[in-house]
Amino acid sequence: MANITKKVSWSSRADDSNATGEGTPLLNGSEGYPRQLSGGSIFQVGRLRTVDMDEGMTSDEDSLRGRPKEIRHSEKLLSLKYESLDYDNSENQLFLEEERRMSYMGFRCLEISRWVVCGLIGLLTGLIACFIDILVEQLAGLKYRVVKENIEKFTTVGGLSISLILWAVLNSAFVMVGAILVAYIEPIAGGSGIPQIKCYLNGVKIPRVVRLKTLLVKVAGVICSVAGGLAVGKEGPMIHSGAVVAAGVSQGRSTSLKRDFKIFEYFRRDTEKRDFVSAGAAAGVSAAFGAPVGGVLFSLEEAASYWNQMLTWRIFFASMISTFTLNFFLSVYHDNPGDLSNPGLINFGRFESNSLEYCLYEIPLFIAMGAIGGLLGALFNVLNYWLTIFRIRYIHKPCLQVMEAMLVAAVTATVSFTMIYFCNDCQPLGPDKAEEYPLQLFCADGEYNSMATTFFNTPERGVRSLFHNPPGSYNPLTLGMFTLTYFFLACWTYGLAVSAGVFIPSLLIGAAWGRLIGILLPSITSSSSVNIWADPGKYALIGAAAQLGGIVRMTLSLTVIMIEATGNVTYGLPIMLVLMTAKLVGDYFEEGLYDIHIKLQSVPFVHSEPPATSHWLTAREVMSSPVTSFSRIEKVGTIVDLLSNTSTNHNGFPVVVNHAAGDEPAKLCGLILRSQLIVLLKHKVFMELARSKLTRRKLQLKDFRDAYPRFPPIQSIHVSQDERECMMDLTEFMNPTPYTVPQETSLPRVYKLFRALGLRHLAVVDDSNRVVGLVTRKDLARYHLGKHGLEELQLAQT
Amino acid sequence: MANITKKVSWSSRADDSNATGEGTPLLNGSEGYPRQLSGGSIFQVGRLRTVDMDEGMTSDEDSLRGRPKEIRHSEKLLSLKYESLDYDNSENQLFLEEERRMSYMGFRCLEISRWVVCGLIGLLTGLIACFIDILVEQLAGLKYRVVKENIEKFTTVGGLSISLILWAVLNSAFVMVGAILVAYIEPIAGGSGIPQIKCYLNGVKIPRVVRLKTLLVKVAGVICSVAGGLAVGKEGPMIHSGAVVAAGVSQGRSTSLKRDFKIFEYFRRDTEKRDFVSAGAAAGVSAAFGAPVGGVLFSLEEAASYWNQMLTWRIFFASMISTFTLNFFLSVYHDNPGDLSNPGLINFGRFESNSLEYCLYEIPLFIAMGAIGGLLGALFNVLNYWLTIFRIRYIHKPCLQVMEAMLVAAVTATVSFTMIYFCNDCQPLGPDKAEEYPLQLFCADGEYNSMATTFFNTPERGVRSLFHNPPGSYNPLTLGMFTLTYFFLACWTYGLAVSAGVFIPSLLIGAAWGRLIGILLPSITSSSSVNIWADPGKYALIGAAAQLGGIVRMTLSLTVIMIEATGNVTYGLPIMLVLMTAKLVGDYFEEGLYDIHIKLQSVPFVHSEPPATSHWLTAREVMSSPVTSFSRIEKVGTIVDLLSNTSTNHNGFPVVVNHAAGDEPAKLCGLILRSQLIVLLKHKVFMELARSKLTRRKLQLKDFRDAYPRFPPIQSIHVSQDERECMMDLTEFMNPTPYTVPQETSLPRVYKLFRALGLRHLAVVDDSNRVVGLVTRKDLARYHLGKHGLEELQLAQT
């Protein structure tokens, strides 16, 4: 069911499992629950939940035959296939016993190992960033040198079309490798990975997102796509890479490699893992932009519900180590070990206060640029949205995806070449050789083609040139043409089946039109004030911020990232105002790019605040009911049957004192998870009716940890007919003190509790503590504020 | 009761109310609850709560006669006199009705006004910082010029003792004014105000901390004490000032001025007010250090339990506006309007990467310096702790406090003069005139006394000189002597009855010994490596960070503040490592300075995490019981009697369905606050038994807001005998959905819920939802991790 409906790259993996011959049956999600991919813990009975399956969705049969047809898509859906992470510890007796046994020194040791893990995360993330950077530089350098030589050869002779073909073929070849890796081996590694990490940090389990294989494909893919000259950056993927590193290191084992180092076993649960993943994401941001504080704020913005001082401090530590590692190894690589001037993959270069100071009356101008950024960003997002819908419907086969990516690579090369060819903007070659690969082309000796500085270069260098090249390096037409073409190229590129980010292209587009504005300003104002507009570099910076803000709509963290990347706090206020304006203007038309992609995946994303006008709703309306619950001592057969019931697929079950007849609510005394029950069944922790063999080994927390996170499916557990008659005592394993709310609680209140504590299940009780419903992530994510007030999304099994 | 025991400046105000003739009876706290200053919502019955009153505490009588004797003090106490803030909205029917009436546009308008308020907070805070800076500069400049002329006059003639006396008298005069303001008018304005703001943001209501009068005294006081040449800074008080501005602006009225502007009425509750105060504190940090991001992180570190993205963004906005305002107006003041180079009150000057780069092998050295900072910080704190105890016992009369402050001022001048006099460290006067007031004294023409650059100057300039003066500006002996004397001066000064901060003195001490290390290093290593130790300025920076970290023990926010103040992200890692080491080493010996002062006040401070080894405890052990509760429809007489009962002084009352006889628990159906009951009684919202006059105006949320935050005491409300027989229906006003936990919930779980949601009362229920206890802030703050495991503090009415 899950695999037949939508085909956006980052969740279409399961669909392709047959093609790659992985051998898992089509309906098995690899995260562990076959036949219950619709997962979730939503109770469908008793509530009207229209599943939008009447039109457009292919039938089960079709998908089984492996030929998905054209797929319709609706935004007004919320998928049930995503499971939630459990940020709230299940404080059952086993857990409490372990915590109580632990001495103060034990807790100290744990704390120290958390620091060690964070240090490792930072170190590895920095190394990966370093590896990517060096390899991209080498490969791209090789490519540019080959093409440059070829162009130079043919410039005088004629026959530049051969150079063009060479360039296009080289690009396509790189991109093909990257696209094949992504499309065939691990689709979730496509794109920047930021939407996926946002979801993970929000508490949604995205299958396979933090696996080692994903990391490998991601790293290889990003190298290929950047070296392939696509309009992409390598910064976004760093965030995803950092997160995978964190998830791997913190668990002290790799399920893919089947190695268990028997360390960090305490961290094998959602709570701890998510904390480390947030540190990893921060380390990734930090390595990408040389912005450790920005990284911390990114993690907080996306992840934090409950602020934890020590955790934040550790996250900061990981970020610092990450940027330092990158800095150090890059300085060694550049044969300049002492010089720590490469804190991040992208380096905006040094903005000196004196050359780039701004005046109070420029602020309205900056704000106007923010508005332009918001408009262009919204346009970008709308175009990309349509494109994504198109891709979901028509380009969902891996081979088509690879072909599209190659096409884009070839087109990018062609467009670049054409632009360079027809551009007559010759600039004198400075003595400092700012250009890495200056293309003379038809320019006079000692001059180079200015368009080539932006097209014939990695995008990072392009951004830096636009920020820092002296006034007069570009003529306005060049910049205008560049903005126009790069805008559409970048828009087309985002969402391809390649690993790549949208940060750098956005910055590049923005820097181009920002610099254009900076150049045009003196000509439209009186000549006396030419002086103050002297340096178009600052407008390039503001434009870059505006465009990026208009596309991704990040606020706090992006401001700090930009401040750190420029290394100049003076620009804080303008950048902040620009980002605010861009977000305000952009939000009026369309959501942020990441939010669009999250929405297209129908992910139950719980925002930090409830919709403003939701005080009308109470827990009674929001909750799912009636609830499937267990008695404290329950028959094994009942448990197996309920867990096997594919139509419900609950993940959490209230435990009640005495199961009343029918749907009569009974007194709540605990909450138990599907995963816990699975482990109990696997270890056959039954109370033998005859009480003959009570010598069975006592189940320990370790057994649960060993099974984490890929708990076996209920179908793989064999329970004999005799065993079905046994009873199981859940008392020791259930969480005896689940959080509850009364039925009359308003939605904002429920929301606040749920979000602040990172809950997965919240029991709703009546005035006698009898459980009448259960609130889960999907119940809250359903409600959102549309243009016409509060809207309710539909839930679907997709 | 509250006023007779401890006399640390910032809470000894009530005791002095008679002296200043404010007219409130001795037992009235100005925060509104006479005869119940012991406030809190702790239930004393049914629990063993030893009050440490047997020895040392003066009797009630004594205090009434206004002659407090020597006062003993115990750290193992937790005062009951502090009330908590309610960060959880009371979602009663009135509130929900209002929220439901409000349209989406209404919420938008609210949101916009929040932004406006934050902008105003930033603007005003920036202006205040600017005002303080300019006035201090003028006054101190005047003083130094006068003294300098005098010294120059007498250097050749002889009779420099006259200059010394002049200097000492000038200092004492300034300080006297400041101390009189603080000691007699508003003691809470003493010190830096950071501990108080920490407490406020933590959720403890510190009386009078955010009043207009406090702000005025604070500003005047800080100007006097800095101009008076004390070893203090003006940065800490900015945080307090920002918080007061925020509390004032956001409420749209001033109770002190008796002006109600009828705006921002929606914000008149603890939740909103605390949010704004955190923005104000951030704006203060931002103005003080030019560190907007550091400000945000400071607020988050101290305040945030529940992360709110929009709030953080607004806080950042306030911070940005604040630093920009300061920057802009200072640039106008310095006749250089375009040059935005004064983002904060303290300006570390520009650290250029190339001149100050560090090598990998220097990092261990930095860490060692961090350890030194931790040790010296711990020493500072221990000394200051003893001094504070001494002050609590003996120096609690305002006149004594003023005299001590004057004494310190005179001693500071004398010591400074002596040091300058006996120091023979002459340095050539540079062409750039780095020194504002160069003292030639006995140096040759064209030279100045090097000791005078640090002593005969505002501390801010001293710090900058130590960071940036070229190598060789100081000789080691000068620095050593300076460190030694300034250390003890600063230690003696902190805690005086003057408004001043400890940041700058700490930085100055650290910079001095850091620079000393930087100078001494080349001499102990081989001469070939002299080159790399060339600039002692970076060691001054590291030393400053180490010393400051060792004293205040802030981590994340301090790192970011230091990074922003230096404007160089390269130093991020060393600064972070240094601060971590300083904290680790320091914490081994003694807590941070602010924590010491908070503890000495017995404030029920709820840390961000529960003690590690507290899984043994459950809600049953932690809670207070039995609970005083009301029925849903309760007799007025019962309510009045319970509220008037001074021995209990509860602030929150569970509302139960039917009051059972005796102490039998009854089913919980709501929670009502003392303040709400007071308003109900004041407006006589009674159900007349005869149901004759049912035309009474319906009580609105506005009535509660008008009374906020100084609700009248129960004693001021007159209820006739007839009225006592009436009934009151609490249904509409109580919070019908209070958060609850079962009795078996472990302390960490209770703690997490309590802290994440910023609760004030948490009801503990049995399995039938009958209320059996109530957990409040004091119940949680009682438990802390001592050197010998979990310790429990005693609760006292002090």
Image (cartoon, coloured by chain):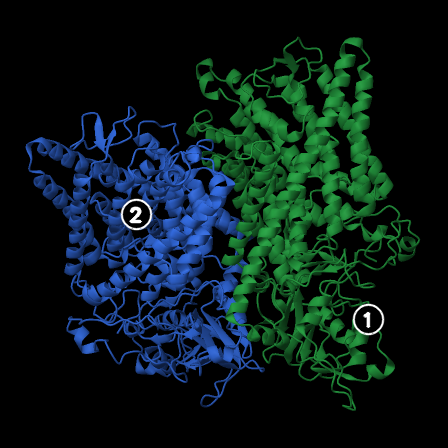
Chain colours: A blue, B green
The chain letter for the residue carrying disc 1 is B
Q: CA distance from mark 2 to mark 1?
A: 68 Å
What secondary structure is found at the residue carrying circle 1?
helix
Q: Is residue A599 above or below residue A112?
A: below
Q: Is residue A578 above or below residue B747?
A: above
In the rendered view of the protein, which quadrant contains the C terminus of chain A?
bottom left
Q: Is residue A400 above or below residue B385?
A: below
The chain letter for the residue carrying disc 2 is A
The answer to whether tags 2 and 1 share a subunit is no
In this rendering, which labeled residue sits more in front, label 2 or label 1?
2
**Measuring 23% from the left and 35% from the top, which residue is drawn there?**
A425
Which of B109 and B672 lies nearest the eye of the viewer? B109
Q: Amino acid at mark 2?
A: Pro
The residue tagged 1 is B644
What secondary structure is found at the residue carrying circle 2?
helix
Q: Where's residue B199, x and y in %?
A: 66, 53
Hey, which quadrant is residue A466 in on the image?
top left
In the rendered view of the protein, which quadrant contains the N terminus of chain A?
bottom left
Q: Which mark is residue A505?
A: 2
On the question of residue B605 being in view, the answer is: no
Check if mark 2's residue and mark 1's residue have beta carbons within 8 Å.
Answer: no
Q: Is residue A693 above or below residue B182?
A: below
Q: Where's residue B593, x and y in %?
A: 67, 42
Which of A266 and B28 lies nearest the eye of the viewer? B28
- B685 relative position to A35: left or right: right
